[in-house]
Image (cartoon, grey):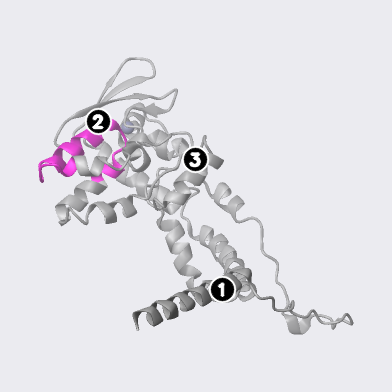
């Protein structure tokens, strides 16, 4: 995930040619909306970026197209495979479309980033040391073994599942009609493969509205179908390594070695060259002035 910097695009494609490089939708919106202002257009943009399958994306693109001629063409100049969820790879259970997490972390260490390298690293180390402890304590406030954010997504999907109707093929397959958009979309759910054609379940690892509707229909335990990435045990594993406390410089033993002196100052080559060029320019100016006189 990056903010469309040209250097990064080239570097990632060279160093990690097999990786999926997403572009931050928020940065694309900032660029695109310079020519296309208005709240309705912004909302439509987010609906396009968040659409989990191509049919849903096309529906939102059609709605966007009604807001002005040429609006869709200008948006699709940004490669949609990099910022539309509908084209994201399903194998990593990560469907984030912006890099807010990096931006937030950068803002959190902003004061430290303006300091000298040792002080900066020391301040970040202390911040992280405290943060790991606090995040571990946060897990004690969870009301079940699934993270609160995953539970919020799950409950929203559950509310949407009320608008779905189901047809069962007698085995693992279900046709689920979703009426939450102005157009009815019929999705296919396979409970054995744990897939749905809306792709949301595979993208996120949290059952989509269609899968939840099927689970209700089959009287299955819904919580069992949330990916292990959202379990408390996985969360705690991420914060299982503690940063150990370090005493400050005043506590260090006094060294008997000679103090390290800074290296002697050398005149940089570039300075010498610049001075020579300036000297030549001055001579030329003087000559042209004298000729003019
Ligand atoms: Zn679905």
The C terminus - image quarter: bottom left
Q: Nearer the viewer, mark 1 or mark 2?
A: 1
Circle 3 residue: 13
For the question of whether residue 180 can be seen, the reply is: no
The mark found on residue 276 in the picture is: 1
For the question of whether residue 282 can be seen, the reply is: yes
- Quarter-wise, where is residue 136 in the image? bottom right
Residue beneath the point at 33% across and 27% down = 197
The mark found on residue 55 in the picture is: 2
Of residues 97 and 119, the one drawn nearer to the viewer in this rendering: 119
How far across and down, in percent of the image, does residue 292 sit? 34, 80
User: What's the CA distance linking mark 3 and mark 1?
Assistant: 42 Å
Residue beneath the point at 33% across and 29% down = 214
Q: Earlier in the sequence, mark 1 or mark 2?
A: 2
Q: Is mark 1 within 8 Å of ligand 1?
A: no
Position of residue 281 relative to residue 27, above or below, is below
Left or right: where 50 falls relative to 68:
right
Q: Earlier in the sequence, mark 3 or mark 1?
A: 3
């Amino acid at each position: 995930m990056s903010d469309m910097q040209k250097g990064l695009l080239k570097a990632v494609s060279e160093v990690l040619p097999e990786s999926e490089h997403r572009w931050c939708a928020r940065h694309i919106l900032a660029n695109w909306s310079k020519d296309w202002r208005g709240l309705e257009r912004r909302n439509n943009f987010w609906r396009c970026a968040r659409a989990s399958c191509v049919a849903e994306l096309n529906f939102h693109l059609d709605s966007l197209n009604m807001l002005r001629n040429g609006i869709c063409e200008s948006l699709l100049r940004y490669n949609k495979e990099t910022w539309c969820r509908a084209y994201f790879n399903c194998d990593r259970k990560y469907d984030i479309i912006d890099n807010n997490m990096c931006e937030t972390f950068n803002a959190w260490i902003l004061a430290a980033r303006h300091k000298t390298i040792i002080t900066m690293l020391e301040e970040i180390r202390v911040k992280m040391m405290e943060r790991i402890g606090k995040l571990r304590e946060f897990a004690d406030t969870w009301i079940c073994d699934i993270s609160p954010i995953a539970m919020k997504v799950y409950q929203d999907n559950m509310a949407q599942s009320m608008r779905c109707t189901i047809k069962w093929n007698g085995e693992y397959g279900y046709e689920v009609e979703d009426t939450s958009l102005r157009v009815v979309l019929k999705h296919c759910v396979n409970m054995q493969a744990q897939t749905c054609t809306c792709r949301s379940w595979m993208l996120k690892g949290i059952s989509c509205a269609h899968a939840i509707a099927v689970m209700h229909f089959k009287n299955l335990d819904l919580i069992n179908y949330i990916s292990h990435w959202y379990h408390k045990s996985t969360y705690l594993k991420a914060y299982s390594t503690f940063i150990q406390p370090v005493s400050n410089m005043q506590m260090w033993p006094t060294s008997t070695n000679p103090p390290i002196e800074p290296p002697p100052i050398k005149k940089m080559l570039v300075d010498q060259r610049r001075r020579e060029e300036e000297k030549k320019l001055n001579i030329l100016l003087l000559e042209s002035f004298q000729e003019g006189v």
